[in-house]
Image (tube, grey):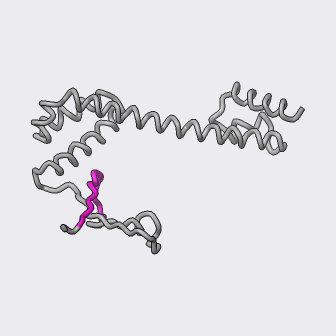
Amino acid sequence: MPKPELYVIFTGNRGKKSDTISLSKEFFNGADIDIEIKAKVIYESDTKDIINQYIIFCKVLDEQREKYGMTEQAIKETIKICKDRNVLKEYLECKETEVVTIMMSLFDDERIMKTYAKDIEKETARRKAKLMLSNGRITIQEMPIFFPEFTEEEAREIEAEVGIMST
């Protein structure tokens, strides 16, 4: 039976990162854990192989996302740049529409997760604001200082909810 090997493709800037990563070191401060996993890290190199081309594609995509946000334009610019640089050129010429569709769905998933996270943060802040108002720790006038994420209207709603709870 062949010896199993795990690989991680790293698409960021290498810096002084190691050639291997360890689950216990990366996520558990080197603690002794029941399952230890070590993986070899593949970074961008001078080769022209498919993995290196994928890493370059990801780096170009990151640059374009910084310029254009998570938009179709960022994807189309990435594809154009990569084809011009002969990175995944044949694949991108044959499958451009599919790549745009897949990348847009990934962007949509990422947007959904970010929106969900913001909603959770706002609901947590709302609960804290209610608690602080109901305990007299802050006034409605102080709410914008401690909770700038709320509009005046939202602050009044929170105040009304606290008033209803206390009667």
Residue in the picture at 26% in, 44% down = 58
x then y, percent, for residue 64: 29, 36
Residue in the picture at 35% in, 66% down = 37
**Which region is colored magenta?**
4-18
User: What is the residue that sits farthest to the bottom in this orientation?
Assistant: 32
User: What is the residue that sits farthest to the right in this orientation?
Assistant: 167
Answer yes or no: is residue 69 visible. Answer: no
Front in this rendered view, residue 1 or 62: 1
Q: Is residue 143 magenta?
A: no
Q: Quadrant of the C terminus?
A: top right
Q: Tell me which corner region of the image, top left, top right, bottom left or bottom right, holds residue 38.
A: bottom left
User: What is the residue that sits farthest to the front in this orientation?
Assistant: 1
Residue in the picture at 44% in, 72% down = 30
Answer yes or no: is residue 147 visible. Answer: yes
Residue in the picture at 71% in, 40% down = 127
Specify whether 83 is left or right of 138: left
Q: Tell me which corner region of the image, top left, top right, bottom left or bottom right, holds residue 132.
A: top right
The answer to whether residue 32 is above or below residue 40 is below
